[in-house]
Image (cartoon, rainbow, N blue to C red):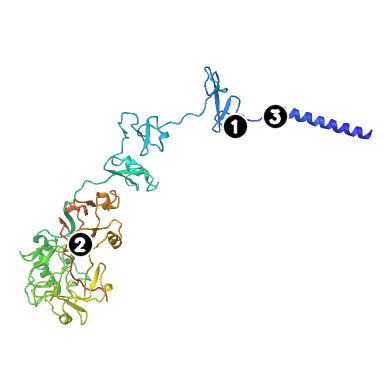
Amino acid sequence: MRNTFIWSFLSFVALATGGLAVGCDGDLKIARSSAGDSCDKTSDCNDGLRCIDHTCYKNATSSGGSANNAGGDGTGGTVVTGPKPPVLGGPGESCAKRADCEDGLACLAQRCQMDGAGMGGGGPTGPTLGGPGETCGLTSDCTTGLTCLPSDGTNFPAARGSGSNSVGVCTPTDNGLEPTGKSCNGAECTTADDCCELPVAAQISNALAPTYGTGVNSCAELAVVLDGVKCDAAVLTTQNAARCFAQATYCTCGKTTWTCSDAGRCVYAAACTKDYATPGGCPTYSRAGYPLTSLCDTDGSGKCEPPAALAACKTDVECDKGLVVADSGGIERCTAGECTCYKALGACYRKCGEDLDCAKGKSCDTKTKVCVPNAACDSDAFCVTYNNDIHSKCLMPEGVCDTECINDRECNYGSLTNSASTRVCNAMHRCELVGCTTDTECPAGAGGVKLFCTATPAPAAGATASSAITD
């Protein structure tokens, strides 16, 4: 009796619970996605929508039916209105593959172009290519004669701050310039008359030239301060001696006082009897402030040049007696055991004992004991290493290390757009500076004096000998 009651009670509870669960389930509604919302399956979408590419899209009723209807029998049904087809590229528009382009176009050089297939062999029509200064991604985006170079922001301001390789600019491969054959090589004269000018360096006294300063700023002022001074007097004050010399040297020059060298440098040609800036002496500076030899070779030529500079030696012993070191600019003399007489030139040089004693590019000739230029190159690899430049080649028949070029870009390390791009590829396929055309392009000399744009001097013949720089 007790057991029957217990089972009856449990059955009642189970039925009540089940009824409650059924009642709750009937009221439960699951939220589903609307058109355009994400989904994983069609059941995730509201009625009338289908899940395509993880997005809910509307269905449209087809009156004629199609192969895409719900039944798939072509007799009618629901046609799925799916995502819009991609917009394909037209002629000249960018692409990554052929599928990015409209029908009949091929993806060539990252541009949609007519490929000519089945069109009578007409071939690609090609896109409109960029002109100078236009942006680009590849050189093929630019017209013939232009190269796509990365911008540093100076040519295309919109690219500033976005990285040097973020955009390219169509840039000329050649800049269209020919070398002028002239250069600003520091020429201070074109004729001897140009040298008859009071140097700025000679106008004031300073610690470097305490006895040379005239204390004046012009030849007119110099004439005023020398009024009443007899420059041919046996005794003059130090300053008046410098003033008298400056007047004769720079203000009232004779026809033979100066000459102008092929390199455009002023050379003092007058005879001398004394050293330094004093009547009968030698100038320390030229018009543009270039230093000159202020010593007079009184025992030789009687010109302003290093004493004994022209005196030939025959033995090392003669050099030991104090002859001038040939390549010292006339200011250094040999001491005992220091020099050797290079008989081919009859001049004294500091002797070397091994290659380490010589400057870069030179080696020691152990027979003559002087430093001589290294042997000519025999391979491109030698030049690349020697000049630390991958563009350097051993050019024949000269047998010298230089850069052989085809276009101007190769002479400027791939750029024609920076301030250092001043070289062009000449007719000999050698890189050459463009050069100057007028004097105004040349930087000023000492004190702001004017320098000249003159014909580029021929390279000086290489010295057959030079002194050791260490031992």
Viewport quadrant of the N terminus: top right
Residue closer to the observer: 419 or 74: 74
Q: Which residue is mark 3?
A: 28
* Residue type for callout 3: Leu
Residue 157 location, quadrant: top left
At x 7%, y 75%, the residue is: 233
Circle nearer the viewer, 3 or 2 = 3
Q: Name which of mark 3 and mark 1 comes first in the sequence.
A: 3
How crowded is the residue under tag 1: few (<14 C-alpha within 10 Å), some, or many (20+)? Answer: some
* Residue type for callout 2: Ala
Residue sticking out furthest to the top: 63
Circle nearer the viewer, 1 or 2 = 1
Q: In the structure shown, which secondary structural element does the residue marked by tag 3 occupy?
A: loop
At x 11%, y 60%, the residue is: 194
Q: Which residue is mark 2?
A: 446
323 lies above or below 111 = below
Q: Are marks 3 and 2 in contact (CB under 8 Å)?
A: no
Q: Name which of mark 1 and mark 2 comes first in the sequence.
A: 1
Viewport quadrant of the C terminus: bottom left
Q: In the structure shown, which secondary structural element does the residue marked by tag 1 occupy?
A: loop
